[in-house]
Amino acid sequence: MPQPRYELIEDKRAIIDRRAIAEQIAALKDGPTLRNECCRLLGEALAAGRAEIGRRILADPARGRAHAAATSWMTDQLVRLIHDLAVERLIPRGNPTKAERLSLVALGGYGRGEMAPFSDVDLMFLIPGPRAPFCEQVIETILYLLWDLKLKVGQSSRTPAEVIALAKGDMSVRTAMLEGRFVWGDRALNEEVAVRFRKEVVAGTTAEFVAAKLAERDERHRRMGDSRYVVEPNVKDGKGGLRDLHTLYWIGQYIHQVNSPAELVGAGLLSREEYRRFDRAERFFWSVRCLLHLTAGRAEERLGFDHQRQISTAMHYADRPGKSAVERFMHFYFLQAKTVGDLTGVFLAHLDEQIAQKGRRFGLPAFFRRSRKLSGFVVDRGRLSIPRDDYFAEQPARLVEIFALAAREAMEIHPTAMRAAARDAKLVDQVRDDPEANRCFLATLTARVPDLALRWMNEAGVFGRFVPDFGRVVAQMQFDMYHHYTVDEHTIRAVGLLAAIERGELSDDHPLATALFRQIGSRRALYVAVLLHDIAKGRGGDHSQLGAEVALKLCPRLGLDPAETEMVSWLVRHHLLISNTAFKRDLADPKTIDDFANIVQSMERLRLLLMLTVVDIRAVGPGTWNDWKRRLLTALFDAAEERLRLGHKERGRSEQVMVKVEALGAAMGWNRRERDRYGERLPDSYWLAESDESIVANARQVAALEPGQISILVGSGDEGATLVTVFAPDREGLFFRICAGLASAGASIIDARIHTTRDGMALDNLLVQDSQGRAYSDKRLRGRLAKALEGALDGPPPLLPTRLVEPRQAAFSVAPSVIVAERASRRTTVVEVHAADRPALLARLTQAIHEQGLLIHSAHISTYGERAVDTFYLTRGDRQKLLAADIEALRGGLLAAAAQPERAEAA
C-alpha cells in the first residue's frame, strides 16, 4: 500500500483543522437545515485550505511535492468529515450488521497522496456484499456532498469479488488498485481486499503487467507527439513527464511491493545516484504542475505558451544574455524530461535482468542469450552492448564508434551501454580532434537511418560534448508558436527526414527533392548542412551568419575537404533564402528570379538548398508542410533552374505572353480573333504571374458573363488552398473590401494576385485557407465565402472582427515593423510588414494602403506561428513607384494597423 508523503507538510492545521470543523458540525442542531449548514462550513474550509495551499505554492514553488501532498491531505480530511456526517447525523443507524460496512479507498494520484490543486478525487466505495440499502444511502449522500463542494469525483462502488474480477481483466483497474489507499470507514474490509489482490491478481503476472504498462506508455507517447521536446509539453502525460516516472514506480510496486520511490534503490532497480536524479525530476515536475493548475485556475496539464511566462516568473527564472527567463525555464524542463528518459532505460535494463526468462527478454521478441562480438562490442540478445564496464574509459573514441555501429547495423543499444556512455560522456572531450572518432561521427550522420542513433547519442550526452556547438542548443526551446520542438530535436528530425527522402520513402510528398538526390555531388555536405543549419540559435545574433562561421571551423575537423566546407558554410548562411523568396516575393516578377539566381549561382547549390529547405520546414512540426508550399518552392526552383542553365531568360517577355495566349486559345477553342482580343484585354503582368490552370479557369469565368457583370468563383482547393476569383468593375478600395469580406467569413488569405483589364475590370485571384490551414472542401462553406464576398462588394464595407487574440498568442509580443525593399522590383515598390498574426490583419493593412491612395498589384502572405509577414507590391495611382514622401506616410498607416492589441483586450 502506498505511503503518502504527508510528513512533508508543515503546519497542517493552517490548511484545514478537521477537529475544529467536526466540533462546529457537532454544535449544529438536527433539522432540515443541517445539511446546508454543514455544506457551508465544509465549503468555507475547502476555500480556505485551497487559498493557503495556493499561498504556499507561490511563496515556495520548489516544494511542489509538499504542496501536492497538502492537497491530498486536505482532501482526506474533507472526505472523513463528510463520511462521519453521513453515517452519524444524516443517515444514522442502530446496530450495524456485517453487510452495513463501508470502506473509502483513494485511487490514482489521490491514492499515492499526490494531488495538484484541481486534480480529480478518485474514490472507491468498498462494500462487503450486494448493495445494502444503508450503504447505498451513505454513498449517495457522500457523493452529493462532494459534488456540492464543486469537486470533480471519479467514483465506483465495488464488492471485494468485483474488485478482484475487474482487476484480472482490466489493466487500468489493476493499476488503480495497486495505488489503493485506505482513507476512512471499515479498515478491515480494505485490508481483506489488499491481501486478495496480491494473492489472486498480482502473483505470477509480473511479465504481463510490465508488458502492458510499457505498451500503454508507448501509446500515450504517440498521442502526445512521441517526443520529449515538444514546446508545449504535457506535464502529466507527455513523454518524459510525471506519468513516465509513475510507470517506473508502478512496476516497482507490482514486482517488489515498494511503498515509495526511494525503495526502488533497495529493490535493485535504481542506484542511489539514479534515484537522486529521479527525485530531482519528480520534485521539479510537481512544482510545475502545481503552479500550472494554480495559474490556470483549473485542472490543466498542457504547459502552454500562455502559462510558461507566468510559471518561469513564479519559479524566479531571470533573463540572461541571448536567452530569456522563459527559455531558461523551458531549457531546464527539457533537461529533466531527458533525465526521465535516461532513467527509464536504466530501470528497464535492471528489470530485464531480474525478470527475464533464461535466454529471453520480457514482452519483446526472443533472442538467444549467447553473446557475439562486433568490432569489439558485444551483441547481447540483439542489442549492442559493451564487454566490460571500463570499455569506454580504455578508448574514449568508442563513445562515438558505438553509435556509428548502431546506425550501420540498425541495432538497438543496450541500456547498460547507454548508462555507461552517459556516465563517461565527458571522456569524449579527449578525442574531439581524433580523425577516427570524427570519421565515426560522420558515418553516423550519413548512415541510411541516422536519426535514431543520433537521438541515442544525444540522450547519452555524447553528441553535445563531441560537438560543443550542438551542446549549446540541446533542450533549447524556441519560444514561438511556429516551432513545435526544441532546436536539437528539430535538427535530428530534419536529418531523419533527409535520409527518408534519400531512401525514396517520401516521394509522394516530395517528388522534386527525391529526384534531386540522384543528381547531387555533395551528399556529405548536405547532411552536415542540415545538422548545422540552426546550430547558432540563441546566440543573440543572426543565426545563419553565426552558423556559417561555425561550419568553417567544424567541417575540416569532421573530415570534409575545403570545397565541401565552403558549400556547407554557404548553405547554412543562406538556408532561409528559398523560403523567404518563395513565400514573400512575387515569383512572376523577373527581378525576383534575377536576384535569387545571382545569389545561388550554381545548380548544385540550388539542388542542395531546395532539399535543405524542404526538411527544415517539415521538421518544424505537424502541419507546417502543405501542397501550397510545395508548389511555390517548385515554381521558384524551376524558374531559377532555367535562369542558371541558360544564363539568361529563355524567351523575352512578349514571347512568353504570346505562348500563354496561344495555349489558352487552343484550350478554349477560340479562333485567332477571339484569342487576340482576350489577350490584348489583359496586361503582360497577368500572363506572366498566373499558372496555366488559373488562366483557363479565369477565361471560362469571364467568357460566361455579360459586359459589366460581377462574378465570384470559389474553387474546390485541390492544391491545399482554395482559389477565389473576383471579376468586377475596378474601383478604389476594392481589394480592401475583398479582404474584409473574406475575414468576416473566417478565411485566411495566403496569396493574392491583383490585375486590372484594359477596359477597367478587376480580375483578382486569391488563395485562401480555413482556420486550420486547409482548403475549403465543404461545398456549403465555399458558398458562405461567396456570399460574404457578394455582401462586401455590393454593400458598405463589412465590419472587421474584434481585435482580440487567443490566450496563447497573448503570451507573445511582436513589435510591428515595415521594411521597404526599393530594389526588389523594377516596376513596383515592395513593402514587407511584420506583425502579430490575428483575424483581419490583412484587411486592416489593405485598408491603410487604400487610405493612402496606392494600388496593390500582388500580395504574399506568410504566417510563422504568432508572427505574420505580409508583402505588398505597390505603385502610386499613376502606376509609378512610390516616392520617399509616399513611403513615410504609408509606414505610419501600416504600423498603426499592425499594432498588437493590448493584452487586457486579449484577456
Image (tube, rainbow, N blue to C red):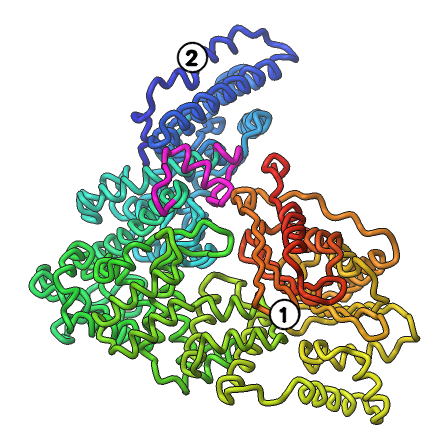
Which residue occupies the foreground of this view, 495 or 230? 495
Q: Position of residue 259 (x, y in %)?
A: 28, 37
> What's the mark number on residue 883?
none
Q: Is residue 680 left or right of residue 768?
A: right
Q: Is residue 196 above or below residue 402?
A: above
Q: Does the magenta stretch include residue 311?
A: yes
> How many marks overall?
2
Quickly name the residue at label 1.
720
What residue is rendered at 58% in x and 51% in y?
835
Outermost residue, left side: 394
The kind of secondary structure element at disc 2 is helix
Quickly name the residue at label 2.
19
Q: Is residue 3 left or right of residue 165?
A: left
Q: Is residue 666 left or right of residue 239?
A: right
Instruction: Rate crowding at label 1 as few (under 14), some (14 to 19) or many (20 or more) other CA atoms within 10 Å.
Output: many
Instruction: Rate crowding at label 2 as few (under 14), some (14 to 19) or many (20 or more) other CA atoms within 10 Å.
Output: few
What residue is rendered at 70% in x and 66% in y?
880
Q: Does the magenta stretch include residue 240?
A: no
Which residue occupies the foreground of this view, 176 or 667? 667
Q: In this view, does 688 lie above or below 164?
A: below
2 and 1 marks in contact (CB < 8 Å): no
Q: Position of residue 294 (x, y in %)?
A: 48, 32
Q: Quadrant of the C terminus?
A: top right
Sequence-first tag of 2 and 1: 2
**Amino acid of disc 1:** Gly
Name the quadrant containing residue 362.
bottom left
Distance between the alpha carbons at the discs numbered 2 and 1? 66 Å
Start-end of magenta stretch: 294-323
Q: Where is residue 892 in the image (x, y as percent from the top left)?
A: 64, 48
**Amino acid of disc 2:** Arg
